[in-house]
Amino acid sequence: MRADNSATHPSSIAVAEPAGALRTTPAIRPEAAEAATAVRGPGSGPARRPSAGRSGTVLAGLGVVAFSLTFPATVWGLESFGPWSLVALRSVLAALIAGGVLLAARVPLPARRHWAGLAVVGGGVVVGFPLLTTLALRTSTTSHAAVVVGLLPLTTAVLGSLRTGERPSRAFWAAALAGAGVVIAFTVWQSGGALAPGDLYLFGALLVCAAGYTEGGRLARLMPGWHVIGWALVLCLPLAVAGSLVALPLEPVHLNAHGVLGLVWVAAGSTFLGLYVWYRGMAAIGVARASQLQLAQPLLTLLWSFLLLGEEMTAAAPVAAVAVLVCIAATQRAGRGAARESRRARS
């Protein structure tokens, strides 16, 4: 035993433990640690450092760029495959990529308590959104279908606030509503103000995708983002294989370069790589802030549709793009301000 002079040094007493003695320090259960992590809002804890916030914004932005190519790539894919075949093959290829990566990295199975959340992710972003938007794109143009993405950021922010406990500021919500309004007004005006036959599919896709994004963002705080989408894809593999076996004999297949490239992109680019960086970004900056970056997605989709599909782009597109970028900057600024206030309150 050793004791230092408490007048000059902090007290320090070391006692040798008898052999075989039990330690009395309570262990922290993994469930408690995960719960503490899951309830952190934007800007809480070490993971919300400014550098992490910047990298999270970049990652989420890369995900938006990948997603913006999804509709044009789907139109290309429909040149070779029927809608059900395209969605099933897309999920099979993405799941094989994800499963190979998980196997190579020797990633253990997720805890049983996470499988329900992974099923929501799979049902929303692996099966539901691709299937419903593919069915809609048989009759709707990509520019009209972009109205779904125009509403998706606001819907995701609302669900994220309810599910994860994030509480964005009033300035954030004002900028988010303004951005959604700009995108909706532009896309509806672009389509002549009329509802397309596929709008019911599009509205359904909006709801299931927002749920998948929200649950994936929550899980990405508990495990690496690529584990989230990887296991969600693997979970959907049996359904995707069964769908392929049923759909391929029933729908015509006419392979061409566009069709194959479209299939490869929606499988590897949109479904795996895009969601990988997207969930990592959401884990770093929060579901609400990340979702608002998607305000730029419809305008990027219009750009790709003009370049890749030859669809018309009006002179109003650049004006809408500038307005949306202003709204995105406002939501990100409001989110950073809320994070700083949260850190000051804790200190």
Image: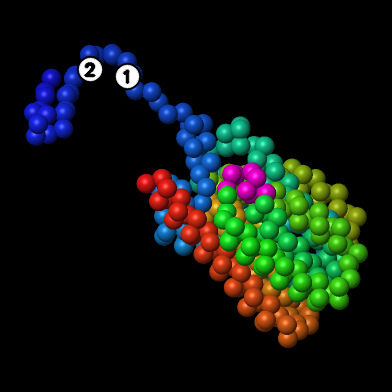
Please say whether residue 157 is visible from this viewpoint: yes
User: In the displayed image of the protein, which residue is found farthest to the front?
Assistant: 170
Does label 2 or label 1 sit earlier along the sequence?
A: 2
- Tell me: residue 149, above or below residue 287: below
Helix, strand or loop under label 1: loop
Residue occupying image coordinates x 81% and y 76% = 189
Q: Magenta residues, as a range?
A: 159-166
Occupied quadrant, residue 180: bottom right
In x, y percent, where is residue 315? 73, 86
> Considering the image in quadrants, where does the N terminus appear?
top left
Q: Residues within 10 Å of mark 1 (few under 14, many from 20)?
A: few
- Coloured how? rainbow
User: In the displayed image of the protein, which residue is found farthest to the bottom?
Assistant: 315
- Tell me: residue 98, above or below residue 266: above
Q: Residue 279: within the magenta?
A: no
Q: Which mark is residue 23?
A: 1
Residue 37 placement, left or right of 134: left
Q: Are marks 2 and 1 in contact (CB under 8 Å)?
A: yes
Task: Please name the amino acid that badge 1 sits on.
Answer: Arg
Between the residue at mark 2 and the residue at mark 1, the CA separation in whole angstroms equals: 9 Å
Please say whether residue 290 is visible from this viewpoint: no
Helix, strand or loop under label 2: loop
Q: Which residue is mark 2?
A: 17
Q: Which residue is nearer to you in this view: 253 or 341?
A: 341
In x, y percent, where is residue 223? 53, 43
Q: Residues within 10 Å of mark 2 (few under 14, many from 20)?
A: few
Task: Please name the amino acid that badge 2 sits on.
Answer: Glu
In x, y percent, where is residue 321? 65, 77
